[in-house]
């Protein structure tokens, strides 16, 4: 049960192309803590993503949410058209490079137990949360929510246990690709679970969006994510 008092701060650090802004939330009182990287939706580093980071901090994690739109002037969006433009303006390789810079920054933090790093992401961030552990062996657990599924050759390089959450009525990510992920995990001998939530749409975890939020299913997906991280990070 979440109980930790939380300290938050805004930080910036050197990235490949610019200074990367990030929001950090961690338990008060010192000590070191396992790390969770929280990767934004296409809206940007907004209050919802900051809230998710604080939820992890209350569970005892050092949580960091990097601004993947730092290269575009640290923007965020409240309407789909602007969000789509921002997401389209971020090359996947640049987003992954900025996440790798985030991992490098984490390693230098005395409050982070940098040998134990998890990643969670939603929507666009779900795509990165699945791609990152296929590119980096420094990730110990990944919980992508309704993100794009990479090609099989990329999935072969998945280096950690996985929990993938998907809404049955998702209008962005195709069910056939989610089924392919589940099949590939088995074929490749990877540790992972794919859970399909009936009746849910894309974004069902986001409690600031009453049009798609599903409280019961979001709570279940959160519990699965916490169990994954508890098993592999603590």
Image (cartoon, rainbow, N blue to C red):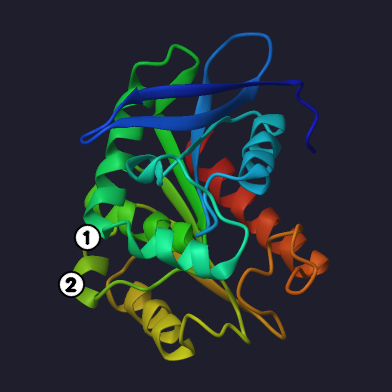
Indicate the quadrant containing the C terminus: top left, top right, bottom left or bottom right: top right
The residue tagged 1 is 157
> Residue 190 placed where, x, y %?
34, 65
Contact (Cβ within 8 Å) of mark 2 with mark 1: yes
- The answer to which of 221 and 208 lies nearer the viewer is 208
Is residue 145 in sight in this rendering?
no
Indicate the quadrant containing the N terminus: top left, top right, bottom left or bottom right: top right
Residue at horizontal 48 percent and vertical 45 percent from the top: 75
Q: Residues within 10 Å of mark 1 (few under 14, many from 20)?
A: some
> Residue 71 placed where, x, y %?
32, 42
> In which quarter of the view is residue 215 placed?
bottom right
> Residue 62 placed where, x, y %?
55, 27
- The answer to which of 61 and 71 lies nearer the viewer is 71
Residue at horizontal 35 percent and vertical 65 percent from the top: 88
Q: Is residue 66 above or below residue 33?
A: below
Residue at horizontal 47 percent and vertical 80 percent from the top: 173
The number of numbered badges drawn on the structure is 2
> In which quarter of the view is residue 10 placed?
top right
> Residue 199 placed where, x, y %?
72, 85
The residue tagged 2 is 153
Q: Which mark is residue 144?
A: none
């Amino acid at each position: 049960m979440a109980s930790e008092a939380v300290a938050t701060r805004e930080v910036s650090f050197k990235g490949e192309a610019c200074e990367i802004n990030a929001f950090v939330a961690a338990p008060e009182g010192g000590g070191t803590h396992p790390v969770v990287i929280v990767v934004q939706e296409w809206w940007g580093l907004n209050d919802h993503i900051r809230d998710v980071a604080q939820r992890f901090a209350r569970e005892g994690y050092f949580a960091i949410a990097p601004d993947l739109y730092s290269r575009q002037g640290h923007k965020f969006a409240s309407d789909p058209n602007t969000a789509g433009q921002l997401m389209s303006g971020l090359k996947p390789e640049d987003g992954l490079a900025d996440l790798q810079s985030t991992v490098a920054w984490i390693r230098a933090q005395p409050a982070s137990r940098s040998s134990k790093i998890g990643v969670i992401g939603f929507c666009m961030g779900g795509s990165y949360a699945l791609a990152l552990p296929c590119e980096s062996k420094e990730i110990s657990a990944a919980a992508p929510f309704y993100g794009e599924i990479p090609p099989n050759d990329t999935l072969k390089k998945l280096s950690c246990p996985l929990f993938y959450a998907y809404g049955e009525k998702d209008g962005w990510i195709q069910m056939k690709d989610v089924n392919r992920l589940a099949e590939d995990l088995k074929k490749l001998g990877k540790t992972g679970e794919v859970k399909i939530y009936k009746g849910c749409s894309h974004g069902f975890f986001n409690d600031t969006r009453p049009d798609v939020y599903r409280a019961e299913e979001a709570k279940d997906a959160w519990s699965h994510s916490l169990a994954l991280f508890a098993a592999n990070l603590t």
